[in-house]
Amino acid sequence: MKVGIVGLPNVGKSTLFNCLSQSKAQSENYPFCTIEPNVSIVNVPDIRLEKLREIVQPEKLIPTTVKIVDIAGLVKGASKGEGLGNKFLSNIRETDAIIHVLRCFDDPNVVHVDGKINPLSDKEVVEYELILKDLEVIEKRLDKIKKTLRSGSNETKKEIDTLERVKISLENATINKNDFSEDEFHEFIKPLELISFKPILYVCNVGESDVLNGNEHVEKVKQLVKGNDVKVIIISAKIESEINELDSEEEKRMFLEDLGLDESGSNKLIRASYKLLNLHSYFTAGKQEVRGWTIRVGDTAYDAAGQIHTDFQKGFICAEVINYNDFLEYGSEVKVKEAGKMRLEGKDYIVSDGDIMHFRFNI
């Protein structure tokens, strides 16, 4: 599961990515790892892990991670191969969610590709190119179905009907996943990896003076997406760069306090990316390690067991589950058990965010 950062050239996209990939890991035992020059595995900041470490005193702490991809800059005409369009569009199709960085700062020293600061226009340019590419994919699929498959079969008719409706939605720029049933989406739409159907987060990149309250550019973005199932966050890539120049955590904390900020924008963005991918965490806690594990929202105890090892799934007996707040209240696994707060759950138990779990299995 990975999220791609997209945007026009010179909007602060790569600066922000560099801040994310160069930031120090929450735990020295699990440093950030760059897979390729434009891909980083980034630790997800989670204060709950630190609380567990204080109680358990493990040998090491391993946080959950999210994969961030810096996608090549987009220009008008990308869907036809202009600029790095083909690279941009092929890379973004491989991601599971999108962070769309919009330039909401004025700086004469940073040239805008269109010569003016207008995040609404920037948003339209990027998303128009994505729609054009999706239309191309839809039309190719429809053409193939009509030429090579039995047009009379019910399944073929259902796929044609679904894709024709998708095509209309794309042409009218009214894409809404809720307009299609779960079966239609998973059978006919999801396999095509249409970019316009991926979850999206808008990041308004502002100057230092606007990082707390935003500005008129940010307000325009918020008004434009109001009522849609998307989130807008405000970050200053310039501030994030300055934070990364500081050596100690104490210096970073003082710097943020001077700006009136509780945490860095990088941390805020990493957590937002994690949620954007519809992910959450459960924990294992022992003297050897305290660790966060990544699962999808709605996953079962059986799915969670498989994240640790396939043997845990094959021989699954049950999961011992402790609520995170109960663990903090009682201070140890033994005391939680004595208070009757540990539960035994089966394969179909839906894991809650923050559950502390131990799996019983037998092979």
Image (spheres, rainbow, N blue to C red):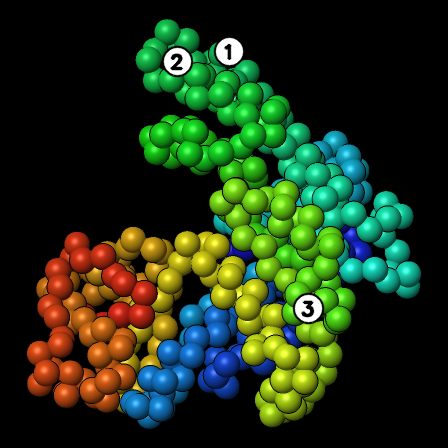
Sequence order check, earlier mark of 2 and 1: 1
x, y percent for residue 119: 74, 48
x, y percent for residue 139: 58, 21
Neighbor class of circle 1 (other Cα within 10 Å; few <14, some 14-19, many 20+) is few
Amino acid under label 3?
Answer: Val
**332 relative position to 9: left or right:** left
**The disc label shown at residue 147, or none:** 1
Of circles 3 and 1, the one toward us is 3
Nearer the observer, 240 or 134: 240
Identify which residue is drawn at 56% across, 65% down. 269
- Are circles 2 and 1 on residues that touch, CB within 8 Å? no
Of circles 3 and 2, the one toward us is 3
Identify which residue is drawn at 38% across, 80% down. 49
SS assignment at label 1? helix
Residue where numbered disc 3 is placed: 211
The residues tagged by marks 3 and 1 sit, at their Cα atoms, a distance apart of 54 Å
**355 relative position to 100: left or right:** left
Identify which residue is drawn at 49% across, 45% down. 229
Count of labels in the image = 3
Nearer the observer, 308 or 260: 260
**The disc label shown at residue 157, or none:** 2
Nearer the observer, 157 or 252: 252
